[in-house]
Image: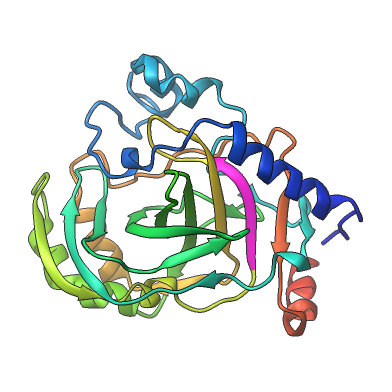
């Protein structure tokens, strides 16, 4: 990985302040409502390449300059030790699971805790999954991606992304398996699942990428602070099938294609003890 210029952290801070002040609010409610007008089929008239033409309010999907997802390449990432460890205070909370047609979402009914970024609290609202992963790591796409969607008091969005490869079962999904089976093919079906601990969704891994982007479903609103965990988790083939079987036909693969970087900074935070391991991996 290339060393960051000394000015990088200062530039990143200025960019973050710029987006927070001037970019239209990322309406994360768009991550909650079902949008039956769009699809992920590149051959379809309402596929990803045409999202910006479907509705006037979705034009940012086509014209936006800081769209998500992107390829998180170590060649374009700069070390940012001053970002520090992720500061969050998650707590178990009552939740429900919803089949939105294009994905499965766990929505928290009560306070499930917050993620703090630059002194601002972003409150956890919901988590959902995309298969295959939307973000790539060094050109590689993974089997699944979890999004933890947070909102500030000003309705600004911050999302934590976690990638999965096929392997051992994921404990968070394991707890939800009975509900996933009942969700299959049931559009807008919602069930209460009792108390859910979001810390289990967050999982392990302290190293992460940070960049400014957008929501990955229409209206593709920009101004989203993205945090993607470096360590790839595992999910079983059975669990992945439960998620894809539950959504509607045509949404089994619900990942938006990669978007252009357009000169954006990608910052990378890595705990000091892990530097050698991650950099060695990046060189191979």
> Is 244 or 148 nearer to us in this picture?
148
Tell me where residue 64 sits by quadrant: top right
Give the position of the N terminus as an image quadrant. bottom right
Q: Position of residue 61 (x, y in %)?
A: 47, 26
Q: Nearer the viewer, residue 100 or 23?
A: 23
Horizontally, residue 95 falls left or right of residue 75, namely left
Q: Does 226 appear above or below 199?
A: above
Which quarter shows the C terminus? bottom right
Q: Position of residue 90 (x, y in %)?
A: 40, 73
| Residue sitting at x 11%, y 57% | 183
Asked if residue 97 lies left or right of residue 118, the reply is: left
Residue occupying image coordinates x 32% and y 22%: 46
User: Which residue: 64% across, 55% down?
Assistant: 210
Identify whether 202 is placed above or below 20: below
User: Measured from the top left, where is residue 136 in percent x and y?
Assistant: 57, 52
Q: Is residue 209 magenta?
A: yes
* Picture quadrant where residue 66 is located: top right
Is residue 28 left or right of 81 when viewed as pictured? left
Indicate whether 252 appears above or below 45.
below
Front in this rendered view, residue 269 or 70: 269
The answer to if 282 sits in the magenta stretch is: no
Q: Which residues are magenta?
A: 208-213
Image x and y of residue 85, in percent: 63, 73
The residue under the point 75% across, 85% down is 273
Q: Give the dominant element type of the magenta stretch: helix, strand or loop.
A: strand
């Amino acid at each position: 990985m290339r060393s960051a210029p000394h000015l990088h952290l200062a530039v990143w801070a200025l960019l973050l302040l710029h987006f927070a002040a001037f970019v239209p609010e990322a309406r994360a409610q768009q991550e909650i409502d079902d949008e039956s007008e769009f699809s992920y089929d590149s051959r379809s008239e309402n596929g990803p390449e045409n999202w910006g033409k479907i509705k006037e309010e979705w034009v940012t999907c086509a014209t936006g300059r800081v769209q998500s997802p992107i390829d998180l390449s170590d060649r374009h990432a700069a070390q940012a030790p001053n970002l520090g460890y992720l500061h969050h205070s998650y707590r178990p909370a009552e939740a429900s699971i919803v089949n939105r047609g294009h994905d499965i979402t766990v929505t928290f009914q009560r306070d499930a805790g917050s993620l703090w970024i630059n002194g601002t609290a972003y409150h956890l609202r919901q988590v959902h999954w995309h298969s295959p992963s939307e973000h790539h790591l060094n050109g590689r796409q993974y089997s699944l991606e979890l999004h933890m969607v947070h909102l500030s008091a000003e309705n600004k969005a911050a999302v934590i992304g976690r990638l999965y490869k096929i392997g051992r079962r994921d404990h968070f999904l394991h707890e939800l398996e009975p509900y996933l089976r009942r969700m299959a093919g049931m559009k807008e079906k919602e069930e209460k699942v009792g108390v859910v601990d979001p810390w289990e969704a967050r999982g392990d891994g302290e190293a992460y990428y940070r960049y400014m982007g957008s929501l990955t479903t229409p209206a593709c609103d920009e101004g989203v602070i993205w945090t993607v965990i470096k360590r790839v988790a595992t999910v079983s083939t059975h669990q992945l099938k439960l998620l894809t079987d539950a959504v509607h036909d045509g949404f089994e693969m619900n990942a938006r294609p990669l978007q252009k970087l357009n000169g954006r900074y990608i910052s990378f935070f890595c705990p000091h003890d892990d530097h050698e391991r991650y950099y060695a991996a990046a060189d191979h």
